[in-house]
């Protein structure tokens, strides 16, 4: 029990003892005082009912009855007919104690229930608020996505429209160039014009390639064959840069379902990046292996490891963003396109890199079939 409860019980006891002493010690001929004392008993009874409910009210009224009864019986004589009013008062004590206690208890229960309802309402309100916030956030996202996709479509149309005039500019520039000899300042200017047009054309082509959806028609592709083609394409460039390019034979031979041309394009982007990042004397190794996927299925993993300049952590977050490039003549679309192609084949493209040490691009692709190589 709490200290406040003890204090309340003590207070009630003192009340009852005090009033009873007044009864027992006041001479009987001062009957008007006894009438007042008799009513004073209601105070502790009502207080007990308010503080402790039905049981408290009844306990107090019974105590008062027990304490008060001997006073009627022995001091007033206790004749039922003469002291009827005093006996009735005792009955009334108990009625008041019981009824007040009951009412207080009911009121208390109701307020507890009301509190519960209020708590429930508050909870629902909070949930509703969270939900509406979520809806607003989703809607904002949707609107942004919608804007981006329209923007993308518009950009694709624009890129397409830019390509044709670019062709004419380049053609006419080439004709003009023939009028001058190499070494003539105008010849150099026209050279710059042609080079810049080429660059613009490259950006537009890369962009269009990214915007164009992957063809639905996929066929069986031998990964090693595509890699060999890519190595053959860049072998000359690698030789000029004095970079040793090494393609490990795949064991077992891996076959995936995909678009060979697109895959080759992704591999080529990655290999060219590696060559551009590596100084002469460096190396680039390409290795394919098989790994099992949790929950069934097999993946192949293709690792392109160079020991070039590497990528610092801050830039690693940005390299997949379209148009992010650190090269003066770069388009910044290579990795974005490659990732899109690989993901379109159900695979992943990740980069592991340490600045100053080198970079490994890791591609995984779901395998259709893996044949042991004799
Ligand atoms: N193997 C690599 N080593 C170091 N940096 C790389 C490598 N591959 C990509 N990067 C960085 O990522 C950037 C984005 O590459 P990419 O999307 O192919 O565009 P681009 O080659 O036109 O710059 C590059 O500019 C380069 O800074
Ligand atoms: Mg690139």
Image (spheres, grey):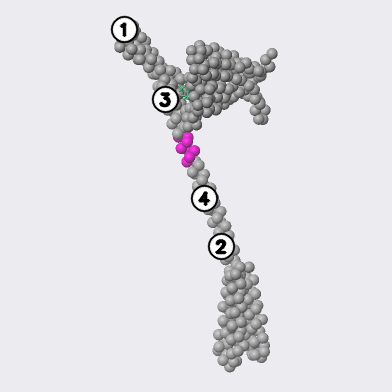
The residue located at (32%, 9%) in the rendering is 183
Where's residue 312, x and y in %? 49, 30
Q: Residue furthest front?
A: 281
Provide the residue span drawn in magenta: 136-143
Q: CA distance from mark 2 to mark 3?
A: 64 Å
Of badges 2 and 1, the one in the foreground is 1
Up the image or down, 190 lies above or below 118; here it is: above
In this image, 330 relative to 65: left or right?
A: left
Q: Split into 4 quadrants, where in the image is the C terminus?
A: top right
Give neighbour class at mark 1: few <14, some 14-19, many 20+ (Cα, 10 Å): some
Q: Quadrant of residue 187?
A: top left
Give the structural element (helix, strand or loop) at label 4: helix
Badge 3 or badge 4: first in the primary sequence: 4
In this image, 132 relative to 106: left or right?
A: left
Q: Is residue 10 visible?
A: yes
Q: Decide: marks 4, 2 in contact (CB < 8 A)?
A: no
Q: Which mark is residue 125?
A: 4
Q: Which mark is residue 111?
A: 2
Please tell me how many numbered marks the rendered image carries. Answer: 4
Nearer-the-camera pick, 178 or 309: 309
Task: Name the residue that disc number 3 marks.
Answer: 154
Give neighbour class at mark 4: few <14, some 14-19, many 20+ (Cα, 10 Å): few
Q: Which mark is residue 180?
A: 1
Badge 1 or badge 3: first in the primary sequence: 3
């Amino acid at each position: 029990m709490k200290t406040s409860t003890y204090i309340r019980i003590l207070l009630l006891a003192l009340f009852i003892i005090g009033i009873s002493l007044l009864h027992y010690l006041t001479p009987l001929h001062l009957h008007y005082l006894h009438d007042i004392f008799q009513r004073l008993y209601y105070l502790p009874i009502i207080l007990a009912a308010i503080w402790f409910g039905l049981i408290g009210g009844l306990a107090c009224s019974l105590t008062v009855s027990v304490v008060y009864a001997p006073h009627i019986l022995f001091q007033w004589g206790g004749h039922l007919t003469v002291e009827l009013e005093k006996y009735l008062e005792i009955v009334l004590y108990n009625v008041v104690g019981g009824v007040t206690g009951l009412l207080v208890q009911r009121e208390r229960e109701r307020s507890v229930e009301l509190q519960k309802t209020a708590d429930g309402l508050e909870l629902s309100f909070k949930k509703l608020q969270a939900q509406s916030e979520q809806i607003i956030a989703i809607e904002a996202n949707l609107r942004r996505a919608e804007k981006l996709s329209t923007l993308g479509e518009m950009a694709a149309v624009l890129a397409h429209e830019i390509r044709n005039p670019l062709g004419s500019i380049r053609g006419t520039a080439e004709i003009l160039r023939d009028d001058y000899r190499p070494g003539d300042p105008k010849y150099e200017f026209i050279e710059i014009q042609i080079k810049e047009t080429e660059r613009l054309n490259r950006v537009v082509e890369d962009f269009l390639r990214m915007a164009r959806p992957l063809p639905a028609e996929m066929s069986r592709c031998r990964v090693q064959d595509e890699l060999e083609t890519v190595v053959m394409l860049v072998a000359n460039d690698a030789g000029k840069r004095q970079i040793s390019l090494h393609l490990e034979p795949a064991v077992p031979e891996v076959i995936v379902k995909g678009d060979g041309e697109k895959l080759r394009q992704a591999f080529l982007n990655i290999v060219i990046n590696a060559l551009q990042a590596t100084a002469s004397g460096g190396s680039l190794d390409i290795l394919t292996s098989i790994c099992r996927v949790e929950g069934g299925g097999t993946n192949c993993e293709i690792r392109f490891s160079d020991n070039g300049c590497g990528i610092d952590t801050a830039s690693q977050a940005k390299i997949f963003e379209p148009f992010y490039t650190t090269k003066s003549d770069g388009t910044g679309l290579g990795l974005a396109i490659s990732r899109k192609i690989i993901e379109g084949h159900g695979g992943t493209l990740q980069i592991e890199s340490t600045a100053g040490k080198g970079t490994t691009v890791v591609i995984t692709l779901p395998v259709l079939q893996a044949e042991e190589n004799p």
